[in-house]
Amino acid sequence: MINQRLFTHYGIDTNKNLQIKRRCPRPYDTILIDKQGSCFACECQSWLPQSIGNLQVKTLDEIIGSTLQKHLQASIEDGTYRYCNEHQCSYILSRSVLDDSPSRIKHLRLAIDDSCNLRCPSCRKGMIFHKEGSAYRLGIRLADRINDWLHGYEHPIQVHIGSDGDPFASHVYRHFMEQTPERDNIKYSLLTNGLMFKEFHTRVPNVIGNLNELGVSIDGATKHTYEKLRLGGKWEKITENLQCMAEQKRKHGFSFILQFVVQKDNYHEMEAIIDLGEHYGADRVYLNKIEDWGTLDDFGSQNIWGSVDYQEQLERVIGRIHARADQSVESERLSGRTKNNRPVIIECPTLIKESVRHRNNR
Ligand code: SF4
Ligand code: SF4
């Protein structure tokens, strides 16, 4: 049954008709599992907040293909996208909804433990770490159920870990990664704060050996800013870990990405994080506008988007994006560059969107 209260909470009008002709693949190919075991047919819970079943009481095989999942798929097929959050879904916002209706699950997104070794002000008000107790025990049960299902799954699939807590700090995710089957059809993508990578990556060779993508969230490019925004992190330790990740990338060939949440205390380091990405051989640097998760008391003070100084910094980043595009085309023309020596790709869609919005409102 559709939980209307949830949609009201997220400000989603379920009577709308977005008239989108493309068919978003996510309700067909993606399952996101949260720390209560609720499963969602989208890559983000707040984009499509209706649970399609709970892993505590059902198996994944029972949840996949359920009446509720089919009901959500029907809202994509008729083009209304009535259950989708058009205010948050980045595909809808950027008018780049994908077009595919796969017949099976290709992405499993785990959000089953929010434990982290840091307490970044933009993310949480205090330390969250489950090493025992009911949340920890439930996380382990869910991890085991997911691994049981993966053992029997024979089709290509990518398991994403780290949207809620840190994969290497969390004892639940460590347990999951230590038990996960070693099979060619299962690939992984990790999002980490990076501080425990060097210490723990050797304990999960199945995951590192089958890693498609390693994302590192790092909101400062200098010691002062990094240690202010990544509360509990040490600059010397993150740079040591970045070096280790760069070496593992060369060995295993995964995609290496730096994620930088732009806010009032770090916007002046947008160019420096690009330089840092280049220094450590990252493939991409993502610059994203800070979002309000309700953890900052004075979120309004983050509104830097119209300031002259910020706009100048953003212009310089956009200049570098253009310069890199030219450089990349020229280099490939001259020497046929390989993936590993291309200049780092810079992406900042939410910053550009905000900038356009400001310009239009002037
Ligand atoms: S359009 Fe967006 S919100 Fe809707 S299913 Fe696709 S990814 Fe999810
Ligand atoms: S490192 Fe990531 S998960 Fe951990 S507190 Fe910071 S933002 Fe949250």
Image (cartoon, grey):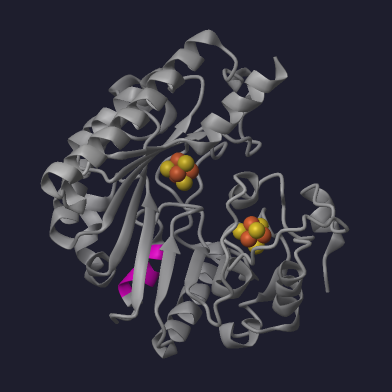
Q: Position of residue 230 (x, y in %)?
A: 41, 33
Task: Give the left or right position of residue 300, taking residue 191 as reference.
Answer: right
Q: Residue at x 43, y 90 (%)?
A: 152
Q: Is residue 60 above or below residue 232?
A: below
Task: Give the left or right position of residue 101, taking residue 150 as reference.
Answer: right
Residue 312 or residue 334, whichever sits in front: 334
Quarter of the image for the C terminus: give it.
Answer: top right
Is residue 122 visible from the viewing direction of this image? no
Q: Is residue 353 above or below residue 30?
A: above
Instruction: Judge whether residue 176 is colored magenta.
Output: yes
- Which region is colored magenta? 172-178
Q: Position of residue 330 (x, y in %)?
A: 21, 38
Task: Give the left or right position of residue 128, taking residue 49 as reference.
Answer: left
Q: Position of residue 86 (x, y in %)?
A: 72, 49
Instruction: Locate residue 51: give its quadrant.
Output: bottom right
Q: Residue at x 50, y 16 (%)?
A: 311
Instruction: Locate residue 14: give its quadrant.
Output: bottom right
Is residue 219 visible from the viewing direction of this image? yes
Q: Position of residue 350 (x, y in %)?
A: 55, 36
Q: Residue at x 61, y 77 (%)?
A: 55
Q: Residue at x 26, y 36 (%)?
A: 277
Q: Is residue 278 above or below residue 304?
A: below
Q: Is residue 42 above or below residue 156?
A: above
